[in-house]
Amino acid sequence: MAHHTIGTPAPPPGRSARSLLAAIVGTTLVAACVSAVAVSTATPAHAAGLSPFDIAGRGATVPFVEHEAERATHNGTKIGPTRYYGQLPSEASGREAVTLDTVGEYVEFTLTAPANAVTFRYSLPDNAAGTGRDASLDLRANGSLVKAVPVTSRYGWFYGGYPFNNNPGDTNPHHFYDETRTMFGTTYPTGTRIRLQVSSTAQSPSFTVDLADFELVGAQITKPAGVLDVVTDFGADPSGATDSTAKFQAAVDAGKAQGRAVWIPAGTFTLWDHVVVDGVTLRGAGPWYSVLGGRHPTDRTRAAGIYGKYVPGGGYSGGIRPHEAGGPSRNVTLRDFAIIGDIRERVDEDQVNAIGGAMSNSVVDNVWMQHTKVGAWMDGPMDNFTIRNSRILDQTADGVNFHWGVTNSTVTNTFVRNTGDDALAMWAQNVPNVGNSFTHNTIGVTVLANHLVTYGGRDITIADNVTADSVTNGGGIHVANRYPGVQGPTAVAGTITVARNTLIRNGNSDYNWNFGVGAIWFSALNEPIQGASIRVTDTDILDSSYAALHWIEGQTSGISFANVRIDGAGTYALQVQAPSQVSFTGVRATGIAQSNPMHNCVGSGFQISQGAGNSGWYTATPYCGPWPTPQWGNGPTSPPTGTPTTPPPTTPPPTTPPPTGGNLAQGRPVTASSVSQNYVAGNAVDGNAGSYWESANGAFPQTLTVDLGAAVDTDRIVLKLPAGWESRTQTLSVAGSTDGAAYSTVVGSAGYTFNPATGNTVSVTLPAGSRRFLRLSFTGNTGWPAGQVAEFEVYGGGTTPPPTTTPPPTTTPPPSGNLALGRPVTETSHADVYGAGNAVDGNPATYWESANNAFPQSLTVDLGAARSVSRVVLRLPPVTAWQTRTQTLAVLGSADGGTFTTLKPSAGYTFNPATGNTVTITFPATTQRHLRLTFTGNTAWPAGQVSEFEVHAA
C-alpha cells in the first residue's frame, strides 16, 4: 500500500540478506542483457501457461486481444519459466518472455481479429545511473516498416528495501517491465503479421518482449452540445508544450457553477498539478485521444492528477491547500480520457496519483491510468464511488486503494497490470470500510503484495475476478486484520463474500519471511478475526506458486470454503501457521507438489469441519518441518471446464458430529462478537479453565456461540471462570439454532453468580430440545465490563458434567516440553508485521520485533496455570542472514499477571548463527503462570527480537 511506511517492509540490516539474494541479483542482470542463442529458423508458436483471458465468464470484458510473445513466432531467446523474485522471467505474464539482443531479431504476432493499435509489454536493462535508457523497436506489418516505436526503462527498475529506490548498486532489483502503446494509422485485417523487430542495439543491448494487446480503437467521441471546452473556452494547450493546470481548473470550476459538463478534446495536455473537481463532469474524446500528463519541473511532489476535495480529519493527513479543502467532492463524473504520468520513483508521501482525494456519489468510467504512483488512492470518508471499464497499468505502488471510511464503493470491469503494490485494496484505517466490492476485474502481474485485498472492513464482496502472476510478499486474495488502524470497529466483520474468482499462478515467496504465501490467505495480526462470516465459494485456484490456502498471524474463525477447485500447488494445499476454525465442503485438490498436502504446526489449534465432496487436501497427520523447495507447473495448461456455481445451502453442511458423551462443546468451532487482546473465543472450548475468552470492554451486548457439529439433544450448560477470580454476577441469556441463522431463546436473560468458593462454576438447565448452535448473550458483569468465560460446556442425552472437585483437563504442554508453545502472549509493541504470536508458534523462521528505537520493551506469555519453571530458551531465525547480536534483557515472573518479580536480572545474551542463534537462560526453580522478557538493548537492531520464546520446567 502506498501511503504508509510499513507496507511490505524489507528486513532491516542484520536480518535481511539471504544467501540466495546475490545469486538472484546476478541472474537478473544477466537475464536482462542475455545474448540469444543463434537459431537458423524462427521458433513457431507453442502452448504456454494458462492466460487470465482463457477464463470465460469471469474477469473484465476488455477491448483488446492479448498475444503472448513466447507463443508467437520469434527468432530470439525464450526466457523462463521461473517464479523467483528478482529474475526477469518471474515478472513476465505466464513467467515466460522472449529476449531480442541482435539486430534483426523479432517477435511476430498474427492477428486473430482486425486491429489498428497495439499495447505491448517489454523490458529494457537499466543504465548505470539508475535513470533508465531510451531506445526504439521497429513495428512492421507483413514485413513492411510501419514506424519505430519508442521504448524506455525510465519507469522500471527499483532496488533495495521498501519503499525502494533507483540505485542499481543496491540489492533486490525488480519491477523490470513497462508498457507502451501506438496506433497503426490504418486497420489491419485478421491474419496480418505484426512484428516487433530490433533495428539497433546502440541504445539498448537487449529488448525483452512479454506480450502484445491488439485493439480496434474506435473513432474519436464527438463533442457533445452544450459543454465547456478546455481549449476553445479556456485556452488549454492540446500540444502539451505549456502547463494547462490553471486552464483546466478554471474550466471545471465554471462547469460546476453553470451546471455544464467540461470537454477535453483530442490532444496531449500537460498538467503540473492536480485539478480539483466537485459537482462536475469531465469527459474526453476517448482514452487513446484525450491524454493528460506531466509533472512540475521543480516541485516533484506535484504532478498531473484529478482529485476530489479532502475531508478534514480524514484519510489524508498532509497539507491541504484552500481549494482542496471541504471534501468530499460530490457528483463527479470522469470519463473517456487517459492520465499517463511521469512518475519514476516511489515516495509514499507524494500526492502524485492519477485520481485521489475524496469523491462521493461519483463515477470514473473508461479512464486509462498509467505511470503514476497509484491509479486511484481514495482518502475517505466517502460513499458511493465507482471505477468501471478502465485500465490501470504500470504503477509504482497500488492500482486502487479505498482508504479510511470508504463505503458502498466498487471497482468493476477494470483491467489492472504491473502494479508495484496491491492491485486492488481496501484499507479500513481508523474508520470502517463498509459495503465495498471488487467485481469482474482482470488483474495481471502484481509485482509486490496482493492482487485483491481487504484490510479490515465489513460486508465486503470480492467476486467474479481473474488474477494471474503475483511476484512477492503477497498472494491472490487476502483477508486480514493487518496494518495500522485495523482493529475493533474497523476490523474484518459482517459477511465477507469471496465468490466465483479464478486465481492463476498466485502466491509467492515472501522475502521477509523466507517462506511462501498462499494464493488465498488470512492474517489476524492486529487482533483475531472473530464474529465475521468469510465465505469462499465457487472458486478455482490454479497452479499456485506455493500453497493454495494459508493461515498466519493470529486466530481466525468463521471461514468456510464451498465448491473450491485446487488444481496445482507448488508446495501444499493448506499451509497452517495460526489457529483457525474452518469448514470445507466440496473442496477438491489435485496436483499438489508435496505428498503430504497439509503443513500444520499449530496442531489441534486448526479445527476443521468437513462436509461432503472433499478430496485431495486433508490428512490426519499433517507435516510440520522445514519448508520444501516449490515445484511449479502442476496446474492446468487449458482452462477448467464445467465450473459449477452452487446456490447457498438451505441447511448447514454435514460435519463431524460431537461426541456422544461428556462435554459436547470441547474443541468445537466457536465464534464471538468480539475479543479483548489475546483472550480469544477458542479459549472457552479448550478444556482448560485457566484460559478464558473476554469480549471487548465497555461494549455490551456481546455473544459467544458454539457449533456442536450436528443437532443433538442438549439439557445443560456449565460455565466456568478461572478458579482464583473474585466473585461476580454476569447477566446472560441462552439461545439455540439448528442452522446457525435463525435463533430462538432457550433461557431468558438472568443474573448468574460465579463464586470462587464454589469453583467459579455456574450450571444452567435447558429445556429439552435438539440444537446444533448454542449462543450466550451477555448484557452485564459486576466484576468487569465485558463478557467472560473460561469454559463453555454443553451436556445432553443424559451426560453429566464432571464434578467441580476434579481438576479440568489442560492443554498446557507437559513439563518435559515447551510450556509456552501456542499459549497467549502479549507485547508492549510490535513493528510492521512481526507480532507477538510469532514467538510462540513453534516456527523459528517467524519472529516478534518490538517498535524500533523505543526501549524498554517486553514480551509476556501466559502458561495458562501456575507451573514450576527453571529455564527459558530464546531463539532467532537460524540462518546466517541474521548476524551475531547481543540483546540485553531480564526475565520476570508472576502468579497473577499483575505483580511481577525478577527471576533473572538484566544481562547481555549473545545470539550467534554459528550456534543456531539460540540462548538458554536458567534460574532457580519457581512456580509462575506468567513469564516476561524485558529488553533494554540490542547491538544489531534497535528493538527486541525473538523468534521462539520457550519455557521449560528444567
Image (cartoon, grey):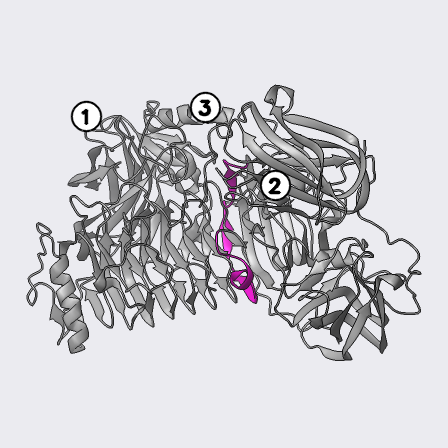
Residue 23 circle label: 3
Q: Is residue 688 left or right of residue 704?
A: right
Q: Describe the element under mark 2 as helix, strand or loop.
A: strand
**Label 2 neighbourhood size at 10 Å, few (<14), some (14-19), many (20+)?**
some
Q: Describe the element under mark 1 as helix, strand or loop.
A: loop
Residue 231 circle label: none
Residue 202 circle label: 1
Image position of 695 with respect to 573: above or below: below
Image position of 708 with respect to 599: above or below: below
Residue that numbered label 2 is attached to = 858
Q: CA gap, disc 1 to disc 3?
A: 28 Å
Image position of 635 with respect to 460: above or below: above
Residue 269, how many percent across, how many down? 14, 55
Q: Nearer the viewer, residue 461 or 666?
A: 666
Residue 761, how many percent across, how many down? 84, 64
Q: CA gap, disc 1 to disc 2?
A: 59 Å
User: Of the residues shown, which amino acid type is indicated by label 2?
Assistant: Ser
Q: Is residue 504 left or right of residue 693?
A: left
Residue 130, how many percent across, how many down? 27, 31
Of circles 1 and 2, the one toward us is 2
Q: Is residue 107 left or right of residue 422?
A: left
* In the image, residue 491 lies in the stretch drawn in magenta: yes
Q: CA gap, disc 3 to disc 2?
A: 38 Å
Contact? badges 1 and 2 (CB < 8 Å): no
User: Of the residues shown, which amino acid type is indicated by label 1?
Assistant: Ala
**Label 1 neighbourhood size at 10 Å, few (<14), some (14-19), many (20+)?**
few
Q: Nearer the viewer, residue 942 or 59?
A: 942
> Closer to the N terminus: mark 3 or mark 2?
3
Q: Residue at x 76, y 53 (%)?
A: 691
* In the image, residue 366 lies in the stretch drawn in magenta: no
- Stretch of the chain drawn in magenta: 484-513
Contact? badges 1 and 3 (CB < 8 Å): no
